Image: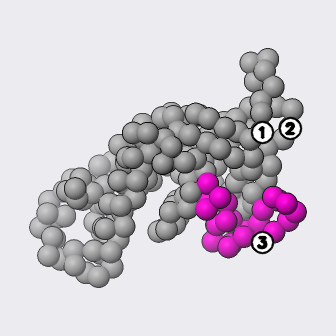
Amino acid sequence: MLGICVGMQMLFDESEEFGTHKGLGLIPGKVVRFPSGMIENDERLKVPHMGWNNLLIRKDSPLFNQVKDESFVYFVHSYYCEAGNRDDVAAGCRYGDVEFCASIWRDNIMATQFHPEKSQDVGLQIFKNFAAFVIIFQLVRTRSVEILGMHVKNCISRKGRRAINGFDMFSFALLVP
């Protein structure tokens, strides 16, 4: 599952947007509004947070394979997610005094607060990474991976990255066009 912008916010327990409302509860935490009156470099910051900002990658995530830390991505939002579990946060971002959750990853749930479709080459790489993850997840789930087992077993795990059923998906993803 890949949630984008409000799709990410819906995954959390609750949101303060237009009153307090329940979310899907798939990721613990809540969605809150940026405070008004934030100042950075002697300039008042506008809400919504709109424009380019850099990602602060917090953990290896399938979405960020071949994406450099501090890459710029495009945001448009007035509310941000406060994750209840730091282990769910794949990347953060800073806007004024607020460091917020820019991306989450838990099991097969991934999401971004930013818009990959507006984030040029970085966004395209994120979509490619997600597609590779889905293909690998399906192969492992359906046991079709046994046909490709030799190729998977011969791949070298990069930095001990997360494996699915013992297969390093980052290495395998390089074999998937």
Nearest the eye: 20 or 173: 20
Secondary structure, mark 1, is loop
Mark drawn on residue 79: none
Q: Residue at x 79, y 17 (%)?
A: 42
Specify whether 1 is left or right of 101.
Answer: left
| Residue at mark 2 to residue at mark 3: CA–CA distance | 24 Å
Q: Quadrant of residue 14?
A: bottom right
Residue that numbered label 2 is attached to: 36
Residue closest to the eye, 6 or 38: 6
Q: Return the disc, 2 or 1, that comes first in the chain's sequence.
A: 2
Image spot of residue 139 (x, y percent): 27, 74
Magenta span of residues: 5-28
Kind of residue sitting beneath label 1: Val
Q: Earlier in the sequence, mark 2 or mark 3?
A: 3
Q: Which circle's residue, 1 or 3, is located before the other in the chain? A: 3
> x, y (%) of residue 151?
14, 63
Residue at x-position 61% and y-position 60%: 8
Q: Nearer the viewer, mark 2 or mark 1?
A: 1
Q: Is 24 within the magenta?
A: yes
Q: Is residue 89 visible?
A: no
Name the amino acid, label 3: Lys
Indicate which label's residue lies in the foreground, 1 or 3. Answer: 1
**SS type, badge 3:** strand
Q: Is residue 90 visible?
A: yes
Distance between the alpha carbons at the discs numbered 1 and 3: 23 Å
Identify residue for label 1: 47
Q: Is residue 106 above or below residue 72?
A: below
Disc number for residue 22: 3
Measuring from the top left, give residue 35's x and y in whole percent. 84, 41
